[in-house]
Amino acid sequence: MVQLASGRPVSDRLESVGTALSWVTTVARLVLGVSLFVAGAIKIGAPAVSVQAVKAYQLLPDTAATFVGHGLPIVEMIVGVLLVLGLLARPSAVVGGLLMVAFIIGISSAWARGLRIDCGCFGGGGTVGADQDPGYIWELLRDAGYLLCAAWIIYKPPGRLAMDSALGLTGSRDADASFVGDEDGETD
Amino acid sequence: MLITIGVIAVVGGGIAWWSVGQSASETVTGALAPITIQPDGSVVMARPGVTAPVVDVYEDYQCPACKQLELTSGSTLKNLAAEGKAKVVFHLLTIFKTDPTMSNSLRAGSAARCVTDGAQWLPYHDKLYERQPIETSVGFTADELVRWGHEVGVTSPDFEGCVRGLRNVATHQQYSNQVMASRKLAGTPTVMLNGQSLGTVAFVPSALREAVLNAAG
């Protein structure tokens, strides 16, 4: 367990619980942040493929699909970097969480309509071949896991090793009130 | 806080500028290279005497990603052929194994083989992509296929009978199966440069042009 430097007069037990939980936030930030960044980085080089992946869901008109296809990789990369750095952690987690909600809705809807889509999240895009299983259930479980990460970060930002702490941008007074000693991440 | 948000906005805008710029489609400016239909139904677009590098385009009229490829990079392929920088070969296949997509694709593939003049084939090819039906509905009906042919100037007197009679379905399917097996295609669209798949590079016009020019040496 990490030695706290705050030296506040609180019980050791509370401190260690608070410390452990803020490390959970750090892990959640890394998992969600790295995944989003990789997903965005794979798509950014070939936006037409990303546009096609969005169109494949047949949920948005072509103009909107083109806009989302170009914009999504950029948003994913930026939010991914912010989460890894712990910069504007809570707003970034809100955006990341909303993306996951949108993905879950899109995949569920595609599944319900019997579409066969390779979601394109990790480099694919377009429709899958007739013999392949689209594997929607695994994509939904994966995105639900990411959503859980986002929810945790929103609940308890910014975690250890976060630039928000260093810059005094925590913006997390209410969530922190229940635990003592998790705002001293800068001393690590 | 404001500075942070400002920096993020500038970085995001910069990436967007780069992303849109490098993936912008070319416009077709001059006359197209001559287009000739081969005995096996593949279609060659190349200036006389240009035999390399070879750009093979494997696509399916019903495949949405192929439509995206045509919208994004079709003009680059036309320009490269017109400039004498490449020999472009179109291979129209049917990758779908369930209906309605399989029958849609077979009707379109068969109809396109009813066009016997290369100069009329490419506009018809482009028209079919422009009017591609969604994957969950029956489309490419005989009436549509005939009407679009006349719209783009297909003149062969036998065209309508050929389309309505589905005369080339068997030939098209046989060619498709043979090509998919021999080229070990994972799916469509696949664009190969001198036999090597270009992957997603084919969807980035500037990168596609660069790859072809480099292959030309």
Image (cartoon, coloured by chain):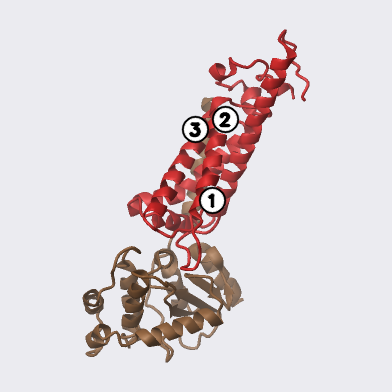
Chain colours: A red, B brown
Q: Quadrant of residue B63?
A: bottom left
Q: Position of residue A1 (x, y in %)?
A: 77, 25
Q: Give the image quarter of residue B135.
A: bottom left
Residues under labels 3 and 1: Cα distance?
A: 23 Å
Tags 3 and 1 touching, CB below 8 Å: no
Dot 1 falls on a residue whose secondary structure is: helix
Within 10 angstroms of label 3, few (less than 14), some, or many (20 or more) residues? Answer: some
Residue that lies at the very extreme toward the bottom in this rendered image:
B39
Residue at numbered disc 1: A138
Which residue type does callout 2 highlight?
Ile
**Marked residue nearer the N-terminal end (3 or 2):** 3
Whether residue A88 appears in this view of the structure is no
Q: Which residue is mark 3?
A: A94
SS for tag 2? helix
Q: Is residue B199 left or right of residue B129?
A: right
Tag in front: 3 or 1: 1
At x 32%, y 88%, the residue is: B116
Q: Position of residue A120 (x, y in %)?
A: 50, 55
**Quarter the C terminus of chain A occupies:** top right
Question: If you read the primary sequence from the N terminus, does the residue marked by circle 3 or circle 1 appear first?
Answer: 3
In the image, which is nearer the foreground, mark 2 or mark 1? 1
Q: Are marks 3 and 1 on the same chain?
A: yes
Say the numbered circle drawn on residue A153. 2
Can residue A121 be seen from the camera position used here?
yes
Which residue is located at x 45 percent, y 85 percent? B175
Which secondary structure, mark 3?
helix
Q: Against A178, is A94 above or below? A: below
Between the C-alphas of marks 3 and 2, the distance is 9 Å
Judge from the rendering whether residue B103 lies leftward or rightward of residue A38; answer left or right: left
